[in-house]
Image (spheres, rainbow, N blue to C red):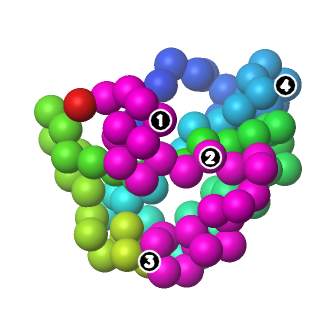
Amino acid sequence: MLKKGIPERKPALIGRGFDEANLLFGIRGQTLDSMTRDISLGLACFERICVNIMCPNTTQVEPDGNVISVFMDKIYPKYKDDQRVDILIQNTDFGVGD
């Protein structure tokens, strides 16, 4: 669904060329298990991860409030103080975006 220009599909191989992975959560179809697995995989293969919560934008992909609620209730508390995990809840949280 999301095409970012990296032809390799194996996270461990991608991690050889990058220090950080950027994960997008809040998309229809994601589950507690899939988001938890993505974070674990990201932390295993990269020095750091950045979790972005989907915000409305100009694309056809829309945020799923239910998925975002699951993230905020179940996952955010576990990782909010982890020094290897940056969490961008609003697209302006890091001083950028509209």
Amino acid of disc 2: Asp
Q: Distance between the residues labelled 2 and 3?
A: 18 Å
Disc 3 element: helix
Residue shown at 42% from the left, 30% from the top: 95
Sequence order check, earlier mark of 2 and 3: 3
Q: Amino acid under label 4? A: Arg
Q: Where is residue 20 in the image (x, y as percent from the top left)?
A: 71, 32
* Viewer-nearest of discs 1 and 4: 1
Does the magenta-highlighted stretch encompass residue 88? Answer: yes
Picture coordinates of residue 44 (x, y %)?
84, 50
Q: Give the range drawn in magenta.
A: 71-97
Q: Name the residue under label 2.
A: 86
- Magenta stretch: includes residue 77: yes
**In what element is the residue under mark 2?**
strand
Residue name at image x 78 percent, y 19 percent: 17
* Mark 2 crowd level (few <14, some 14–19, many ≥20, 10 Å Cα): some
Name the image quarter holding residue 9: top right
